[in-house]
Image (spheres, helix red, strand yellow):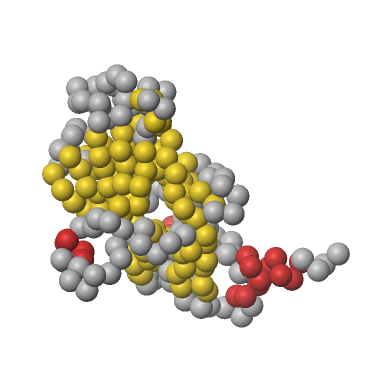
Amino acid sequence: MKQGSFKVLSFAVCLILMAGIALSTAFGDEVTVRYESIMLEDFSSGTEHEWTVGSRTFRYDFTWALEASRFASNIDGVQYPRMAFADAFPMALYGLNREGKEIRSLGINGRFDRRGYNWIDIYPVSTETGEPFEIPIPGRVSHLDTWVWGSNLNYYMEVYLRDHNGVVHNLYLGNIGHQGWRNLRVQIPTNIRQSRRTVPRFTGLELVKFRIWTTPTERVDNFYIYIDHIKVLTDTFESLFDGDELADPDRVQEIWASAN
């Protein structure tokens, strides 16, 4: 090999190594993981929700509401869908509940005037304002799952997540054409970005809502669905560095609130 060609090759190798080091520095937290399971909602603990990740505790106060597409039934002044917090739960999680704990799930009673692609949205609302509330999910979410009781009707379910750019992604959670309780689970695609080069690196997702779809060949005159245990598996690892508290959004607000 000529000396000039060797120099060019050496220079190219150096550039590749430098790029690799830069990427490792920029996105190092994406290759080191600390998975934690976080319960977003169990429907048994009231409207106050709290979970701790690392040294931070997150507290939110919300409940749930329903909304349906245009052909939702109204019979004798009763507007469907109806919602109730039912004394029901999956035995796979709680057994027979011999200790007699108060365990609830979210019950939905739906009716539509005609078959088709009808939908019901199940979404969180702030107990303070009554407005829709999107649940912030700490870390980088790997999976989301929930337990659903079905009546063997050919319906299916989606979950809607908002990223830090404001884009809402709808993910297929599963078909609910089964009898009894079943765990539905979805892996969050890697093309939904949950981190960035600049600090704070976490750009967590927000849970917007769940949507249940009916299908044109299935009956919709009267049905019941129950939901329990909304949970995420999330990577909460973030590297510590000198001054990392200045990347904490709460700390930033505290500092600059009195700047004027």
Q: Residue at x 71, y 70 (%)?
A: 254
Q: Residue furthest front?
A: 76
Q: Residue at x 70, y 65 (%)?
A: 253
List x then y, in percent, for residue 143.
32, 56
Residue 72 vs 167, above or below: the answer is above
List x then y, in percent, for residue 158.
33, 41
* 6 and 252: which is toward the camera: 252
Q: Residue at x 25, y 26 (%)?
A: 221
Q: Residue furthest right?
A: 260
> Which quadrant: the N terminus?
bottom left
Q: Residue at x 66, y 71 (%)?
A: 251
Q: Is residue 202 left or right of residue 250?
A: left
Q: Quadrant of residue 97?
A: bottom left
> Which quadrant: the C terminus?
bottom right
* 56 and 216: which is toward the camera: 216
List x then y, in percent, for residue 34.
37, 72
